[in-house]
Image: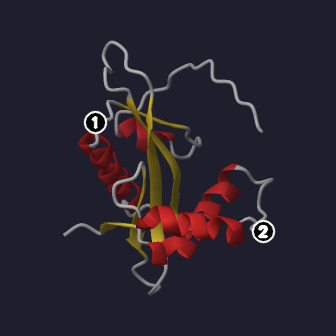
Amino acid sequence: MSLVRRALPEDAEEVLRLRQVMIDAVFATHSSVDWHGESLPTLRRKLGERDGDFVAFVVDHPERPGALASLVAGTIDYRIGKAGDPQGQVGFVFSVATDPDARRLGYARACMTTLLEWFRERGARRVQLTASEEAEPLYASLGFRPKPTPLLELRL
């Protein structure tokens, strides 16, 4: 029996807590949690959608009832197809986080494996993510490879 389950609307506060664990670890300058209250209603709604383009998988904390030990979230985006990817379904992984006291137990790997299967079932042929240096070995072991990209970003 798998420890991984799909996150539910009632998990939203814990999902945000673990997302903040990831943000604090990767982007030490963004430690404010003021945005959580505004984000919570949308996250609850998205976690309740079963056929949408967003999903989160979690592992319950083995020693703290009601808490989550690990989280992975992802979306599927549509891009006009191309050779090798005619359907244009692209998975994107974000918010991979494990509570500091639950690391090195295989929870992130189990969540990632479940998310990758979710992507496959929905026709995604490519999956993208950005990785911290600490997480790169996990992603490499799952088959992810670095890819130079000319990505630009504009904040509106």
Residue flagged by tag 2: what amino acid is it?
Asp
Horizontally, is 131 left or right of 61 in the view?
right
Q: Residue furthest left?
A: 1
Q: List x then y, in percent, for residue 26.
A: 67, 50
Q: Left or right of 77: which side holds 123?
A: left
> Going 42% across and 67% down the picture, which residue do you hit?
48
Q: In the rendering, at what x and y percent does residue 3 appear?
A: 29, 69
Quadrant in the picture for the N terminus: bottom left
State the scheme by which the image is colored. secondary structure
- Please say if 84 is above or below 119: above
Quadrant hosting residue 82:
top left
Please identify the residue farthest to the top as the structure is shown: 83
Q: CA distance from mark 2 to mark 1?
A: 37 Å
Which amino acid is tagged 1?
Answer: Gly
User: Residue 34, labelled with which disc?
Assistant: 2
Horizontally, residue 122 falls left or right of residue 88, namely left
The quarter of the displayed image where residue 123 is located? top left
In the image, 88 versus 131, the foreground residue is 88
Q: Position of residue 63 (x, y in %)?
A: 43, 84
Q: Of the residues under marks 2 and 1, which one precedes in the sequence?
A: 2
- The residue at the point 30 percent across, 16 percent down is 84
**SS at mark 2 in the image:** loop
Considering only vertical position in the picture, is 57 above or below 1?
above
In x, y percent, where is residue 56? 43, 59
Label 1 sits on residue: 123
Label 1: element kind: loop
Question: Which dot marks residue 79?
Answer: none
Closer-to-camera residue (39/144): 39
Residue plotted at (45% across, 56% down): 72
